[in-house]
Amino acid sequence: MGQEQKILKALVVDDMVLHRKQLTEILEEIPGVDVVGAAPNGKIALLKIAQLSPNLVILDFEMPEMNGIETLRQLKKEDSDATVIMVSSRTAESASMTLEALSLGAYEFITIPSGKIEAEERERLILQLKPLVNSIITRKILNRTIETVESAAPEISLPRPIAGIPANKVEIVAIGVSTGGPNALNEMIPKLPADLSAPVLVVQHMPTVFTEALAESLDAKSKVRVVEGRPGQRLEPGTVYIAPGGKQMKVIMGRDPSDGYLLGITDDPPENHCQPAADYLFRSVAGIFKDRALGIIMTGMGSDGAAGLKLMKDEGAQVIAQSESTCVVFGMPMEAIKAGVVDLVVPVQKIADEIVKRVG
């Protein structure tokens, strides 16, 4: 047996010795990863990046001398090709910094407790980190062997554009998005007009606290109102509802016809390892709005959303997917396209235009 090929050279940057050790152990359990070093702050990390040329950096936010944001800014200035995964605590301040880090080019983030990582937390950390690292490895392999992959991979049949706009008026827009989502939503939602005549519901895979920070950030730069969803909230046109982290979100009918359509926020279990899950939202939209709905699947890992979009499509809904060239990870849109439920594939820059065409 030959020695296992190492695709990623990783550097772990965290001021806590215990966290550096545990993150290193988890990374070394992932095939294809070689942890080449560690650093207690950004200043030392930049020196080690220059010496060791890692292509993956696990970067903490709160560190002495140079924090994670300052380090990320310097890496951007130096045009580094290292992929950065941020390590964040679960606080409102960290959530705000995480959104800034993603806008500066961080690939994604993981959350970690401030103290010792117990066995249950370690398992949760593995579930966060391993898929992200594997997606980066896959991307590296594809980039290295693009000609071979193109000739060997089965073709994905892309849908043709919808001929004109269907007669049925869209009364609700439901969106599923994951890895790369905050930046994609930042690109799309501020382009929506204030008088959009339908509500927009968004499932972004994020933990508690982070979805509230995302809603506040988007609201500050958008013409539409953007809020984190609350139980029993009435759906209003021109408003974007972000599913709260750690909960499931669905559409329900009010008890009285005058109540209109409401948000249901539940503690129902994760689906596709996601809470909130796009499939959960899409299912409820399919059941209530039938052919008066628009489903949108955007950048993200895995297959969440594909099954729910099939139900929406079976009821006559329209479905749009984000194009591969504008996705950080093409997993979720690709699975929906492979399932044959997508009507149109467009770059993220044009999704808002397509919503307006169909909603008014």
Image (spheres, rainbow, N blue to C red):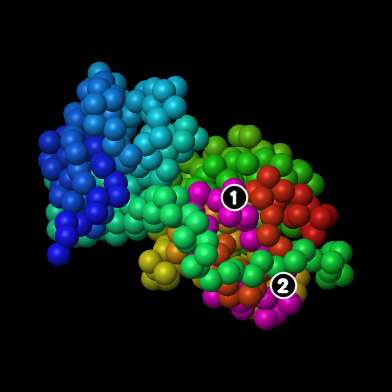
- Evaluate if marks 2 and 1 touch, with contact meaning CB atoms under 8 Å apart: no
Q: Nearer the viewer, residue 116 or 123?
A: 123
Residue 347, position in %: x, y? 66, 50
Residue 323 in magenta stretch: yes
Q: Is residue 69 above or below residue 298?
A: above
Residue at 18%, 34% in the rendered image: 38
Give the secondary structure at mark 2. Answer: loop
Q: Is residue 142 above or below residue 341?
A: above
Question: How far is the residue under mark 2 from the one under mark 1?
Answer: 25 Å
Residue at 70%, 80% in the rendered image: 315
Residue at 64%, 70% in the rendered image: 157
Q: From the image, tell me which residue sits under label 1.
A: 325
Q: From the image, tell me which residue sits under label 2.
A: 317
Name the mark nearer the viewer: 2 or 1. Answer: 1
Count neighbours of disc 2 (C-alpha within 10 A) and say few if under 14, some if 14 to 19, many if 20 or more. Answer: many
Q: Is residue 336 visible?
A: no
Give the secondary structure at mark 1. Answer: helix
Residue 132, position in %: x, y? 36, 53
Based on the displayed image, in which of its 4 quarters is residue 13 positioned? Answer: top left
Left or right of 233 in this view: 74: left
Count neighbours of disc 1 (C-alpha within 10 A) and say few if under 14, some if 14 to 19, many if 20 or more. Answer: few
Based on the displayed image, in which of its 4 quarters is residue 125 positioned? Answer: bottom left
Q: Nearer the viewer, residue 304 or 218?
A: 304
Dot 2 amino acid type: Ala
Residue 55 in magenta stretch: no
Dot 1 amino acid type: Ser
Q: Which residues are magenta?
A: 304-330
Which quarter of the figure is the C terminus placed in? Answer: bottom right
